[in-house]
Every structure is written in C-alpha cells, then in structure tokens.
Amino acid sequence: MEHSMGLYETPFNSIKSGKKKVEVRLNDEKRRKISVGDTINFTKIPSSDETLTVEVIELREFPTF
C-alpha cells in the first residue's frame, strides 16, 4: 500500500542523503494504516517540488510521543 506525507526540507534532505533512517510520527488514524512493506511518498514542503519514496521496514510503538 502507498501512503503520502509531507516532510519539511531539513528532514527530507536527511532521509534523501541516508543520514536519517527513522521518521517518528504520532500514531493517529492515518498512521495506523501503515504496515511493514508499505511505501511512503514524502513530498518536500512547503515547496512541493520534490518527492522521495521509501519502504517501511519496521514499526515501533511508544507509550508517549
């Protein structure tokens, strides 16, 4: 399954370069639909001029954000 999310320039570029390998999100209704093996299409915001597709390889839940 494919998901779309916005990501600000600094974390977007860090993921693109391979420096950032983990993205933390609130486990809201939209994020609960994500499963291992899914892909996420990140759009760099606010410019929306670049996208990056990544595969979800692991999910972790924490008691607090």
Image: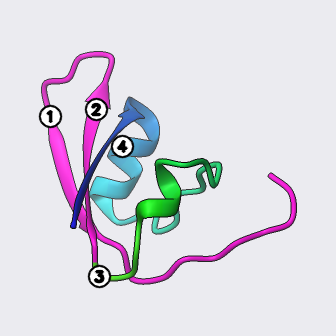
In front: mark 3 or mark 2? 3
Q: Nearer the viewer, residue 29 or 2?
A: 29
| Element assignment for label 1 | loop
Mark 4 vs 1: CB contact within 8 A: yes
- Residue named by callout 2: 44
Q: Earlier in the sequence, mark 3 or mark 4?
A: 4
| Element assignment for label 3 | loop
Q: Which residues are magenta?
A: 38-65
- The disc placed on residue 12 is 4
Q: Residues within 10 Å of mark 1 (few under 14, many from 20)?
A: few
Q: Residues within 10 Å of mark 3 (few under 14, many from 20)?
A: few
| Element assignment for label 2 | strand
The amino acid type of the residue labelled 3 equals: Gly
The amino acid type of the residue labelled 4 equals: Phe
Mark 2 vs 4: CB contact within 8 A: yes
Mark 2 vs 1: CB contact within 8 A: yes
- The disc placed on residue 37 is 3
- Label 3 vs label 4: CA separation? 20 Å
